[in-house]
Amino acid sequence: MAKRVLVVEDNELNLKLFCDLLRAHGHDALAVRDGRDALAQARAFRPELVIMDIHLPHVGGIDIIKALKADAGLAAVPVMAVTAYAGKGDEDNIRAAGAQAYVSKPISVMKFMDVVNGLIAPHEPEPSTDA
């Protein structure tokens, strides 16, 4: 079943790669090039996953993640952060902002899709312990 994935990325090549990969795996991908539009697009598109570049012009990905998590209608949507600038402490800061996953660029296609699928796969209900 197709999942809606919002991709926030300012680099055209990465944006095309991410969206093409998602679509090739049967997902509905919406590209957002400007982080200033991310929150409004997320509200309209109602994604089941957000893929967020961290280093964007105008507004940073960490700030967008915090805004998504502060929005009652979007707070439960998992966020996968992607960044080319993986410095000491970056992953901790990104996860503290609310991202459930962190992938550094350049990405491995297999790892990218493994993380995506892990975040949007339907979760099986926990087995009942009632006897």
Image (cartoon, rainbow, N blue to C red):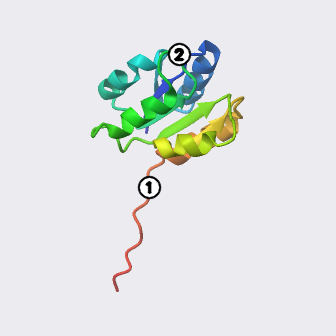
Where residue 123 sits in the image (x, y, percent)? 44, 55
Mark 1 crowdedness (10 Å alpha carbons): few <14, some 14-19, many ≥20: few
Q: In the image, which is nearer the foreground, mark 2 or mark 1?
A: 2
**Which disc number belongs to residue 123?**
1
Residue most toward the bottom?
131
Q: Residue at x 47, y 21 (%)?
A: 59
Picture mark count: 2
Q: Secondary structure at mark 1?
A: loop
The one of 84 and 3 positioned closer to us in this rendering: 84
Where residue 83 sits in the image (x, y, percent)? 63, 30
Res 131 → quadrant: bottom left
Where residue 101 sits in the image (x, y, percent)? 56, 44
Q: Is residue 91 visible?
A: yes
Judge left or right: residue 104 versus residue 38. Answer: right
Judge left or right: residue 43 versus residue 102. Answer: left
Mark 2 crowdedness (10 Å alpha carbons): few <14, some 14-19, many ≥20: few
Judge left or right: residue 9 versus residue 72. Answer: right
Q: Height in image: 38 above or below 78?
A: above
**Gap between marks 2 and 1 measured at Cα:** 35 Å
The one of 6 and 131 positioned closer to us in this rendering: 6
Res 67 → quadrant: top left
Q: Residue at x 43, y 39 (%)?
A: 1
The residue that mark 2 highlights is 57
Q: Is residue 2 visible?
A: no
At label 2, the amino acid type is Pro
Which circle's residue, 2 or 1, is located before the other in the chain? 2
The one of 106 and 56 positioned closer to us in this rendering: 56
Q: Secondary structure at mark 2?
A: loop
At label 1, the amino acid type is His
Res 45 → quadrant: top left
Where residue 35 sits in the image (x, y, percent)? 45, 20
Q: Residue at x 64, y 43 (%)?
A: 89
